[in-house]
Amino acid sequence: MSVPASVVKPPLVDELDIVIPTIRNLDFLEQWRPFFQPYHLIIVQDGDPTKKIHVPEGFDYELYNRNDINRILGPKSSCISFKDSACRCFGFLVSKKKYIFTIDDDCFVAKDPTGQEINALAQHIHNLLTPATPFFFNTLYDPYREGADFVRGYPFSLREGATTAISHGLWLNIPDYDAPTQLVKPRERNTRYVDAVMTIPKQTLFPMCGMNLGFHRELIGPAMYFGLMGDGQPIGRYDDMWAGWCAKVICDHLGLGVKTGLPYIWHSKASNPFVNLKKEYKGIYWQEDIIPFFQSVVLPKECTTPQKCYIELSKLVKEKLGPIDPYFEKLGDAMVTWIDAWNELNPLTDGATTVKIEPSKTK
């Protein structure tokens, strides 16, 4: 006997949280309602904690503001950025689910070339539940996709692939450009829909954007720290980049895969390039040293968990990047604080004391 479609559970509905950082009312959720409503939301409110954030009726959510972050983490709250979307990683910290999908509040449902609305969450889930191919590039991209396979010459010993830890989605309309590119191409829009998912090869870094991102929290969550950005820090808009560089190095070490491509979302709003330049300019300069650092990182074989990898990486950050600017000493310390907080709130992963987590608001 077939089960009516109305009672069929969406995939991973009990195993995935949607994390949204915001400073405004979440009216954008209305457009995502058909896709997001069955899932649990974790909303991380940045900025003024006394401001009331409106969440449309019918969504299951918990909301945390800065007061909650300070109360739950105590002194460790210093590792969570303020007045920056990097605060989203607090949602990763308090989630108890196996998977995370995170999205920005200026991202809407895109349409494919046939005019069909794209269920971005469903595509991320598909990406995460199918293997990746980090050790050998398949020229037909994702060999596990319907209608594709491994091409001639692909080693049979590698066709089982690797577990996918990260699914990195893209954007139509407003591209994710840095400030200098925004300034020289103010009217450029991305209209190209490329129907492909590919695995980023091992030992290849990439610029990770946090506005349309899925990941396996149990496998790589401890490495998904979005750094110290925003208020009181000398840099901004490198939060997701930092997390991506750290996570990719650790995925490579642990034999995990990272995919990029589908799904697309519709990015609706271009941020101010002059404001962005003030946030980014040190990062643009520093990354010429940061990238070679990450390219040269070799983690010891004793690092068998993302936590151990991240602690080792924090030592290297202080040692190798600290001479560039005192900020990296501070960042290295914050990386350790982040892992301490992770272990405290996630005792099953490291045997730490359980902490009671209570949001400001639930629905």
Image (cartoon, rainbow, N blue to C red):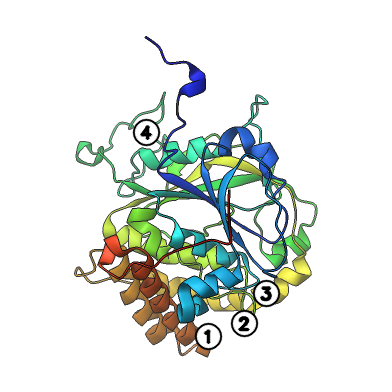
User: SS class of the residue under badge 4?
Assistant: loop
Q: Secondary structure at mark 3?
A: helix
Mark in the foreground, 4 or 2: 2
Frontmost residue, 144 versus 68: 68
* Label whose residue precedes the other's in the sequence (3 or 2): 2
SS under mark 2: loop
Could you say which is closer to the camera, residue 58 or residue 22? 58
Residue holding disc 2: 234
Q: Residue at x 38, y 64 (%)?
A: 222
Residue 327 is tagged as: 1
Of labels 3 and 4, earlier in sequence is: 4
The quadrant holding residue 333 is bottom left
Question: What numbered label is drawn on residue 143?
Answer: 4
Residue neighbourhood size for the residue with mark 2, other residues' Cα within 10 Å, grouped as few (<14), some (14–19), many (≥20):
some
Spatial CA span between label 3 and label 2: 8 Å
C-beta proximity under 8 Å, tags 3 and 4? no
Q: CA distance from mark 2 to mark 1?
A: 8 Å
Give the CA distance from mark 4 to mark 2: 43 Å
* Contact check, label 3 and label 2, Cβ < 8 Å: no
Real-space CA distance between mark 3 and mark 4, rounded to the nearest whole angstrom? 40 Å
Q: Residues within 10 Å of mark 1 (few under 14, many from 20)?
A: some
Precedes in sequence: disc 1 or disc 3 = 3
Disc 2 + disc 1, Cβ < 8 Å: yes
Could you tell me residue 225's position as x and y percent? 46, 67
